Image (cartoon, helix red, strand yellow):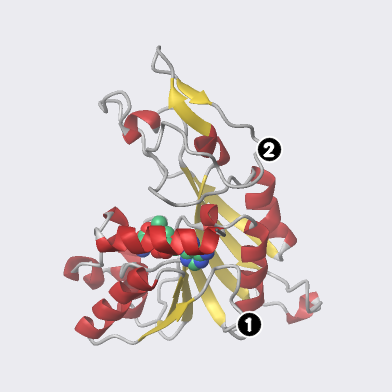
């Protein structure tokens, strides 16, 4: 079976059991939505009236926070159950959120150059070709638009297990092709999901090739010196699990805009 129905089923299941990824925005978070979304100060001071795409963001967190901050929000996800949470929370709070069920690498239902901000939590690991996602994001973004995305790092996905000395073992090749096999170490993997490793040149170079410049890059810290061996925060001391990238769309390769037509704040 292809990765899409498998991942839809896996995420529907995670939504049903209300996994940690289905934590909807709280009242307190909605009172300071931008601070909650963005502790690094990457977002503009206001997103009021901005067109925001929350990509692969079902679960009722990002969409609700952006809508609480006054943005015009579209949320895309493969899982109808994750999207139900956005729908339910938007209704409960009297917010407008447009819901679209599709894969992140097929945004054909969205017209080009319409979004000021695209915000994507960890999710590109669920598709085989990260550059296909970037191509679609580039198409639907306005020149000058901001693309914030978070990804699993390749090294983290290469770890398969711990050996007898409790050392985390890189058991998969960096040039791994196709779906990742199951390993014993599941700390940063989701049950039942089909995942793919994207190399650094794909994660960062792919962005550049699709008309983005990278303005900042952070590694969210998951290390805790007091965490017991095997705990995800113990593993986080040795390998950064995630990378967060701030990118700006400066030109649209497919449409050959002249530099004069590009707005860079
Ligand atoms: C880590 S969760 C993100 C949701 C959550 N709101 C958060 O704050 O982290 C990853 C999301 O990616 C979605 N997803 C998986 N494969 C996808 C695909 N091919 N296209 C769009 N969304 C996908 C899942 O359904 C899930 O909602």
Residue 120 visible somewhere in the drawing: no
- Label 1 or label 2, whichever comes before in sequence order: 1
Quadrant of the image occupied by residue 249: bottom right
Badge 1 element: loop
| Vertical placement of residue 74 versus 30, above or below | below
Q: Position of residue 174 (x, y in %)?
A: 64, 35
Label 1 Cα neighbours within 10 Å, binned few <14 / some 14-19 / many ≥20: some
Indicate left or right for 46 with 259 as reference: left
Give the image quarter of residue 158: top right
Numbered mark located on residue 113 in the image: 1
Image location (x, y in percent) of residue 164: 40, 13
Instruction: Tell me how many marks there are.
Output: 2
Relative to 244, residue 113 above or below? below
Q: Which mark is residue 175?
A: 2
Residue extending farthest to the front is 1
Q: Quadrant of ligand 1?
A: bottom left
Task: Indicate which label's residue lies in the foreground, 1 or 2.
Answer: 2
Q: Is residue 55 above or below residue 3?
A: below
Q: Which mark is residue 146?
A: none
Q: Residue at point 29% right, 85% down?
A: 95
Where does the image place residue 199, in percent across and percent down from the top left? 64, 44
Q: Residue at x 41, y 67 (%)?
A: 57
């Amino acid at each position: 079976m292809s990765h899409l129905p498998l991942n839809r089923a896996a995420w529907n299941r995670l939504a049903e059991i209300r996994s940690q990824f289905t934590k909807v925005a709280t009242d307190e978070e909605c009172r300071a939505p931008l601070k909650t979304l963005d502790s690094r100060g990457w977002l503009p001071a206001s997103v009021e009236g901005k067109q925001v795409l929350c990509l692969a963001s079902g679960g009722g967190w990002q969409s609700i926070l952006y809508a609480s901050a006054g943005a015009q929000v579209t949320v895309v996800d493969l899982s109808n159950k994750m999207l139900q949470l956005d729908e339910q929370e938007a209704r409960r709070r009297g917010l407008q959120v447009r819901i679209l069920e599709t894969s992140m690498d097929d945004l054909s239902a969205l017209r080009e150059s319409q979004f000021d901000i695209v915000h994507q939590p960890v999710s590109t690991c669920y598709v085989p070709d990260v550059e296909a996602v970037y191509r679609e994001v580039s198409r639907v973004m306005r020149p000058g638009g901001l693309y914030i995305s978070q990804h699993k790092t390749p090294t983290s996905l290469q770890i398969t297990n711990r050996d007898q000395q409790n050392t985390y073992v890189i058991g998969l090749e960096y040039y791994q092709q196709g779906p990742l096999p199951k390993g014993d170490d599941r700390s940063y993997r989701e049950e039942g999901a089909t995942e793919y490793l994207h190399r650094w040149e794909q994660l960062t170079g792919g962005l550049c090739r699709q008309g983005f410049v990278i303005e900042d890059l952070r590694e969210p810290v998951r290390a805790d010196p007091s965490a017991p061996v095997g705990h995800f925060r113990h593993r986080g001391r040795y390998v950064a699990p995630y990378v967060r990238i701030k990118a700006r769309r400066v030109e649209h390769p497919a449409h050959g805009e002249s530099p004069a037509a590009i707005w860079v704040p």
